[in-house]
Image (tube, rainbow, N blue to C red):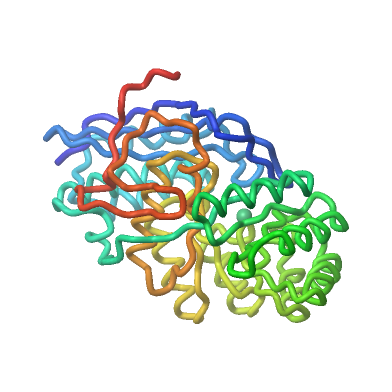
Amino acid sequence: MKITNIYTQPLKAPLKKPFITSLRRVDTLEDLVVIIECDDGSVGYGEGAPTPQITGETMGSMVAAIAFIKPHILGRDIEDFDAILKLIHSLLVKNTTAKSALEIALYDLKAKSEKLPLFRMLGGTQTKFSTDITISMGEIDKMIADCHSAVALGYDTLKVKIGDNPRKDVERVIAIDAALDSDIKLRLDANQGWTAVQSVELLHALEKQDIIAEFIEQPVAADDIEGLKYIKERVQTPLLADESIFSLKDAKKLLELQAIDYVNIKLAKTAGISQALELADLSKNFGVKCMIGCMLEGPISVAAGVHVASAKADIITMLDLDAVSLLASHPVKTSIEFNESEIVLSEDMGLGVSLGEISNL
Ligand SMILES: [Mg+2]
């Protein structure tokens, strides 16, 4: 099963409503599909969406990174799977989303070559999952209305985006908490919007009102490791690291410092599936549970995240894989059920995805 061609296809997909965080606003998803063809007719699909504010990649840089790697893996046999992955990571540093898209397509092919769904190839058995949904940052009334809509759709866990205005952030969370039934769980994501001192003050203000979210995600700048530790030592609300952890090295440092309670694994940060699996194992060694998250991205890469969640279900206990439900439409077809908060893996070989007719280029 030799690789005969690799090509990329940029896609656009409209969102149901704008996606707004303290770092960015997105109205239309732009992502890149990677297609790898083999000499026996097998096709593997990968995908990634450039998120310049987080990974430093653009659509152009992703296309260029994949074109750079392409000649080195053309003609290679999928049987040399581990060597091909190693090669990809040794040829180019960073470019994590581009390498993730390539890896996802290779894992799709590898699982197809073994005639297994990817999660089974990775040793997973769990097929049903529940995800949260993101509530975009905005005015309080709009955020409460969005929370009510999400609950009406069946979500019992909401990930609330805050971080642009510390005082308003506390007002937002108090108002949202008061507007929702007590069985609805809140996750808070400040996307690096606060300082460490502000974080402690704001979380204490919430804790005083008996509001302890499931976690506060990335309150401070990605490189503010000391800040994370400072916060963790002073608040009751569990602390989850997102932008601070791309590599295993990043995670090891934070875990050794006992600076966080949870790790957010995203394939676009770990440069694909192989290091996401290793990151889950590393976290497990430290007794730290993980969430698997996604960028605002398409169904192929989100599907890959679900397979990883199944493979490491003992340590990945939380899912933030709502991107497919945020899209109004997308040309990728998938046999995985993305039914709002419920996600169900299928027994189709590989990722369980295919490319429908592409009409919206
Ligand atoms: Mg985040």
Residue at 54% in and 46% down: 295
Residue at 46% in and 66% down: 279
Q: Position of residue 83 (x, y in %)?
A: 28, 53
Rendered view: 295 above or below 186 = above
In the rendered image, the quadrant that contains the C terminus is: top left
Q: How many marks overall? A: 0
Front residue of 269/115: it is 115
Residue at 67% in and 57% down: 189
Residue at 17% in and 54% down: 116
Q: Residue furthest left?
A: 40
In the rendered image, the quadrant that contains the N terminus is: top left
Q: Quadrant of ligand 1?
A: bottom right
Rendered view: 274 above or below 286 = above
Q: Position of residue 277 (x, y in %)?
A: 39, 63
Front residue of 246/134: it is 134
Q: Position of residue 194 (x, y in %)?
A: 80, 59
Would residue 105 appear left or right of 249 to someone viewing this image?
Answer: left
Rendered view: 24 above or below 346 = above
Q: Residue furthest right?
A: 167
On the image, which quarter does residue 273 sit in? bottom left
Front residue of 154/264: it is 154
Q: Position of residue 269 (x, y in %)?
A: 52, 52
Would residue 233 appear left or right of 132 to someone viewing this image?
Answer: right
Would residue 15 appear left or right of 177 to someone viewing this image?
Answer: left
